[in-house]
Image (spheres, grey):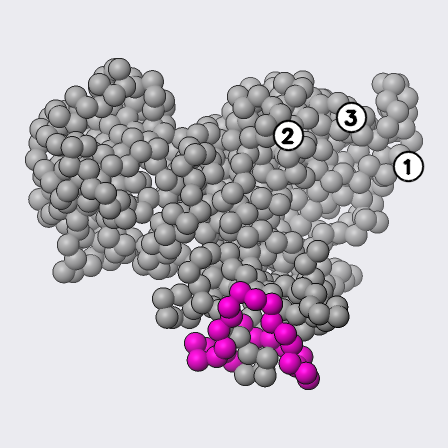
Amino acid sequence: MRKIFFLILCSFIGISSFAQSNPDDAVVHIVPEPVSVKTVNGHFQLKRDTKIIAANGQIKDIAAVLARLLDAPTGYHLAVKNGNNVHEKNAIILILNKTPDSQIGEEGYTLQVSPERVVIAANKPQGIFYGMQSLLQLLPPDIESKTAVHNERWDVPCVNILDYPRFGWRGLMLDVSRHFFTVKEVEEYINEMAKYKFNVFHWHLTDDEGWRIQIKGLPGLTDVGAWRVKRTGRWGTFEAPQPGEKATDGGFYTQQEIKDVITYAEKRFITILPEIDVPAHSLALIAAYPNLSSTQMPYPVWPQSPPRTVDNVLDVANDSTWLILDKIFTQVAELFPCPYIHVGGDEANRSFWMKDSADVALMRREGLTTPAQLQSYFEKKLEKIIVSKGKKMIGWDEIVEGGIAPEATVMSWRGMQGGIEAAKAGHNVIMTPWGDAYLDLYQGDPLAEPPTYGKLLLKTSYTWDPVPDSVDPKLILGGQGNLWSESVPNFRHAEYMTWPRAMALSEVFWSPKDKRNWDDFLTREQYRFKYMDVAQVKYAKSQYDPVITGVKGPDDSLEVKITTQMPGLDIYYRFDETNPDNFSPKYDGSPLQIPKGASMIKVISYLNGKPAGDQINCPLSEVAKRMEK
């Protein structure tokens, strides 16, 4: 039935369909990869008199968004009209299916491009929006220009595309607590997400280093909790706040600003998941209201992660804790339409509870024998508050320890195991393991990148799969990439850390598993760089950088091995401490013997005869630390 409908529609709109399929599909560089792409001979040319036709009032706003996106680079000011004439020529036609197509669901679409017209059809408006994103990726890269580009021919290759997502949850998280990002920057981040069909923006609004959301009736949260002393440099090396030092670094969002961002995201079919991180990671809250911790000591907001001697954990047995949490979550629930609220739950230093007589007495009354069980008590009590506000609770995988709250959804970050355990217990799971989805990790050689920790290569993200073999796939809602901002002090660096690894994740979350192909992804991803250059979005080129390791040579001598993430790169090197280029020795794949007296190897990659990656200057002492096992 699905195929019959698709063929009838193709015939109906005047496309000679698959009979003229072009074997060269290289003209299509869509990320994430659609379910099915068939190229057809010819092009549709966007012209000054091209019309955008919204065949249903529900998608009129999408048509207006498309017109604005096309108007800026083309300078055409395209007309938007209502109507349902799918025979219209020189038109982009947006239609909702009268009979829903069960295969494409609520977010899928079909996109047919012929020389006469473009037709995007879907069951729901969000499908039309995602079809629009694919259409924009078919246009030349200058479509990202913010000003009119003259003498450009706006051609769209003729294609037949069938597309729908693998997962319903396709998220990215931005931590605005460790470093604050403005409303404009958050909206720019959301805008880039939309291009790759992400549909959840996880907004990490509170943590030890800053409280970012206005809560009416609790002015201390933003008067005190939103600000810390100014420090610049490498996270983890900052000087502690000094007595009398003014807290001038930070910021927060008013409730009206949050409403504006929510509206902005809704127009791009992105749901905003708010996170209020409790019971730990609560120093900003405790700095504002010191009576909420077990020690009840006055603490400042720290410019980095506080030492373990600082009590950043809410006191479970304190009635004031629950009064304030109820007030906070009441307003959060009213502000955010998202059916979920994320409550954190990670990395609680439970030792403070064990030193508090009221918490120990609470454990005795409730028959709790371990600190993990006391946190489980906290999470279950908190879930009742969340449910009373008409919401569902999500927490990091620590909430599994000691017994999970009955209806909670688990976001598994310490690996896949927490998610596996939760799924086996019948809970919904969102997979976001740090080794596959944490965008704040190094994405190339640390010698060539700003300082952070760990490592997450582009290929690692791309080859990861969120569904373990041992669980019911229906319980895996999807996955998410997380950008923690300890080492991300500005928005340009946030972009750099997000892209292109989030492109890889978008394909993991959207595309069929059997469609994923690393080499093909690289071709499409690199073509997308042209669009990002025009849009002035910063992205990392770490995939081009060589990977330098040490291996044992004869008589246990140290030798240098060089590999690459992507194929087709030529690697050149020098041991004499001069800078290499394509006239230097070329690496042939065999381990390199180290010349006597050498202390460093310098390496650079070339692609198609031009420098591609950053030059890596690697001391041989560092090579020795990178010995392959």
Q: Which residue is mark 2?
A: 419
Looking at marks 1 and 2 on the same chain, the residue that comes earlier in the sequence is marked by 1
Q: CA distance from mark 2 to mark 3?
A: 15 Å
In the rendering, at what x and y percent does residue 223 appear? 63, 48
Q: CA distance from mark 1 to mark 2?
A: 31 Å
**Which label sits in the foreground, 1 or 3?**
3
Q: Which residue is mark 1?
A: 355
**Residue 1 shown in magenta:** no
Quarter-of-image position of residue 346? top right
Q: Which residue is mark 3?
A: 402
- Given the image, on which type of amino acid does mark 3 rest? Gly
Q: Main secondary structure of the magenta part?
A: loop
Q: Which residues are magenta?
A: 579-603
Q: Quadrant of the C terminus?
A: bottom right
* 607 relative to 78, above or below: below
Looking at marks 2 and 3 on the same chain, the residue that comes earlier in the sequence is marked by 3
Q: Residue at x 49, y 28 (%)?
A: 338
Q: Residue at x 24, y 52 (%)?
A: 140
Q: Residue at x 48, y 42 (%)?
A: 505
**Residue 594 shown in magenta:** yes
* Residue nearest the viewer, comparing 287 with 478: 478
Q: CA distance from mark 1 to mark 3?
A: 19 Å
Judging from the image, what secondary structure is the residue with disc 3 in?
loop
Q: Is residue 520 visible?
A: yes
- Given the image, on which type of amino acid does mark 2 rest? Gly
**Which label sits in the foreground, 2 or 3?**
2
Horizontal side of residue 373 vs 185, given as left or right: right
Judging from the image, what secondary structure is the residue with disc 1 in?
loop
In the rendering, at what x and y percent does residue 372 appear? 80, 30
Q: Are marks 1 and 2 in contact (CB under 8 Å)?
A: no
- Given the image, on which type of amino acid does mark 1 rest? Lys
* 228 relative to 409, above or below: below
